[in-house]
Amino acid sequence: MLLSRRLATGLSAIVATTVVTAAVPLAGVAAPAPADAAAARDATSWLAGEFTDGTLPGPFGGQDWGLTIDGIIAMSATSGSAPTRQAATGQVAAHVRSYNSYDDWGIEGFTDGGATAKLLYVASAAGADPTDFGGYDLRAVTLSLLAGADAGHQRGRITSRTTADSGPDASNTFDQSFAVLGLARSGDLPQDTVDFLVRQQCAAGGFRLYPDTADGPSPSCDEQPGATLDVDSTAMAVQALLAAADSGAAGASDAARRGADWLAGQQHADGSFGGSGPTTGANSNSTGLAGQALAAAGRDSQAARAADAVTQLQLTAANGGAAVGDAGAIAYNAESFTGAVSTGIADTDRDQWRRATAQALLGLAQVPLGRIGLDLPPTSPTPTPTGTATPTPTVSPTPTVAPTPTVTGTAGPSPSATGSPATPSPTVSPTGTAAPSTTPAAPALPGLPTTGAAIIGYVLVALLLIGGGVVLLVLGRRRRAQ
């Protein structure tokens, strides 16, 4: 799910009030009806039509596993397009290591913490068994990637595991939120994991995207001078903390309430939201995710206004103009919407529309991340043939590059971090062996904003840097709003 929304660490230098009622328990609370059932249904139908052989492609072709997961989460939120959703779940289950490792590229011994946590969450949300997803016990692997007691103030943080010295861990608030959500939905939730997420909240109530600074991981948001509070990260954290509170975690309810307070204060007059950094302007990714969080926190009026803002960016049979054939799709922003109505959706822009729709749809459905799929019958996903996908540009990855975490949302560029990574808990090897992708996409840098925001320009700059000696891995994971 979602996120795909901000710049990777390696690219950051190039680019860069109503009170909620006490704890809002999720257990036993019926999922609310979509704010606009017709709009949600149309968006789901359009998104499902963008799948080919159970996957969504990336900006250069090939399977984009992070975006495919975002699509599964979105379709699960509306319980729509069941055949496509089940086929996609089967494909992801068959390619676990294509998403959370660099195995397909011959780099063994690496497991991405954020990607693993997102896999754990989507397995639960899609009605699959997270302890046997494509032969992997994702809950056990996620638990093994949590920083242990010897990590000090980093205890409980989701981290990546690698046999190489890859520098500081790049996990962020999206990754931590997926870890909390996935663990809460699959069994007992470690308090340390919740405590680390709460420490990413500043006194104002908003959450920062990254826990790291140029001097290394800072103990808390308030101890980071000038910390940037991010709408998308806060929306993710609020939903994760509501799920944690429902599981009985201490401190989660109050933190979620304060996060919702801050989030409501960031809403624009027209109901929209913007992110941070390059996504500061009003956009459907941030608006959809924030609206979903507000609905989860019981802020019905603000959530309804956010949903209305999203519908203003949705193509319909009445307003679609040259893009009427793509009715149901949701534009990233007003500029993208106007351009499509005038000339249609160009092939080079379709990736942006997929990412925007997948996350913005959450603001229409308004089913909290903690509840998506809970009412769906368990499914045993069956992978479908992937066929032949267009290969992505060749990038030669090196195991010394610290990948940035998987994201589902728009967010600003990550700060440059040089500190030491948190120490992960003892390794737990996944069971089974997932089938390799027929056409592996370039290993994903989990933090590049492959979301509603246009990213092709950033990727091209990164590719040019390769010739100058800077090797970056092209992100396939998300992440819209990540």
Image: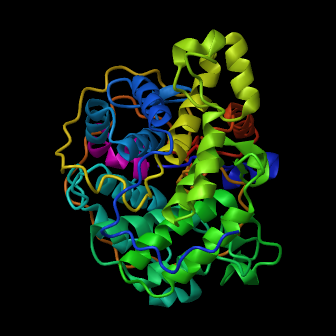
User: Residue at left 67%, top 64%?
Assistant: 263
Residue at coordinates 40% horizontally, 74% vertically from top-left?
25
Q: Report if residue 10 lies within the magenta region.
A: no
Quarter of the image holding residue 355? top right
Disc count in the image?
0
Q: Position of residue 155 (x, y in %)?
A: 50, 84
Q: Which residue is pictured at 80% across the width and 52% down the height?
A: 13
Q: Up-down: is 405 above or below 65? A: below
State whether residue 171 appears in this view.
Answer: no
Q: Position of residue 186 (x, y in %)?
A: 28, 67
Q: Is residue 98 magenta?
A: yes
Point out the stretch of residues depicted in magenta: 91-105
Q: Nearer the viewer, residue 211 or 228?
A: 228
Front residue of 93/330: it is 330
Answer left or right for 61 relative to 228.
left
Q: Residue 453 or 270: which is nearer the viewer?
A: 270
Quarter of the rendering containing residue 382: top left
